[in-house]
Image (tube, grey):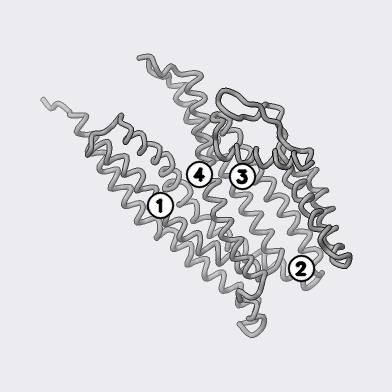
Amino acid sequence: MLEPNFERSKDLLEENDGAGNTFKATAKPVLIGTAVVGATTMIFSIIMALTNGLTTNVDKLSLLHAPFFLGLITGGAMIYWFTGASTQAVTTGAYRAVEFIKANIKLDSAEKASVADSKKVVEICTKYAQKGMFNIFLAVFFGTLTFAFVEPFFFIGYLISIAIFGLYQAIFMANAGAAWDNAKKIVEVKLKQKGTPLHDATVIGDTVGDPFKDTSSVAMNPVIKFTTLFGLLAVELAVSLTRDQGTGLTHLLALAFFAVSRSTGCESDRSKRTASRIEGKNAIQLTWMAFCVVLKGRGFSRAVSLEKSSAGFTDCGKTRFCSCFWVAQRFTAAILASFSATAMKPLRVAARATRFFSNLFSCSQ
């Protein structure tokens, strides 16, 4: 009679899983590379259209052209924001699942968790991950429309930066995530150090590695593809509107798209803050609170109030976080004071616009 050796089977499965992580880390850059190849084709089609076959405005495809250079910076910033936000979307679901498990499942007893509780945990993780990623993709999508309507050569720099930064960031995250996961498997299977401080350290690393290799890196593929695809259509529309009706309409549409993008980004940030209540010493939460306290100390009324609890600094339930557009309006007003009277008019318009949108799209709870 065959008697299965479950310990040996588990070790073999862990080794196979480690090999699978290595295979995935090798294949994912190829996947992202195909997106970059497609993006390159569409970017050059935009360049050929805007320069009439490289006969005019070629000088604007230079680092000396400020909008193009700023586009390169903005594209890289968008990639790093997206990777951090997508990782946090997964973490939010994990925190919520931990809350539910602590409240409803007795971990210190021999009684198994019920099927209903297990399904609820899966539902919580799925719900928060999907909600977070949906908001993030909306922010990226409307951000792309915003930049397409701001200035065409700014947008070309943005697309180039998205492709380059996205490719290498995805390669890094796929490899780093697989390395963290495999490090835990080596400690468990080869070193037999499960339950030791070394194993605890690798488990912490794996909680970062899993979102890296399974969420953020692979999500870079649709980000690059859809950004360039919708951007190609949007910049053609923006150029046509500018030619027919001037820059006023395109800039107004850019402001509207930015408002939607910022509001969905704020919604994603709000879910982060909700998850971080579980640990009062969470660095993101404390940094944001410190920022708001500084604003309050400088006379800004929409700041937060803090109370100290046994777990550290947490929001007291009556917290009102600073309105993003309100802060932008205050910042614009500060700039106005440093400009001459002739340069003030467009900035006053921007200040009024941000003041208007502060009442529509707010990050306050």
| Circle 3 residue | 135
Which of the two discs, 1 and 2, labels the residue nearer the N terminus? Answer: 1
Residue 169: image location, x then y, percent:
47, 57
**Kind of residue at disc 4:** Thr
- Residue 262 is left or right of residue 242, and the answer is left
Mark nearer the viewer, 4 or 2: 4
Q: Which mark is residue 218?
A: none
Question: What residue is shown at x 62% (from left), y 29% (from top)?
Answer: 314
Task: Tell me which corner region of the image, top left, top right, bottom left or bottom right, holds residue 364.
Answer: top right
- Residue 147 is left or right of residue 113, and the answer is right
Mark 2 residue element? helix
- Residue 209 is left or right of residue 63, and the answer is left
Mark 1 residue element? helix
Gap between marks 2 and 3, in whole Å? 28 Å
Gap between marks 1 and 3, in whole Å? 23 Å
Q: Which mark is residue 174?
A: 1
Residue 172: image location, x then y, percent:
42, 55
Residue 278: image location, x then y, percent:
55, 29
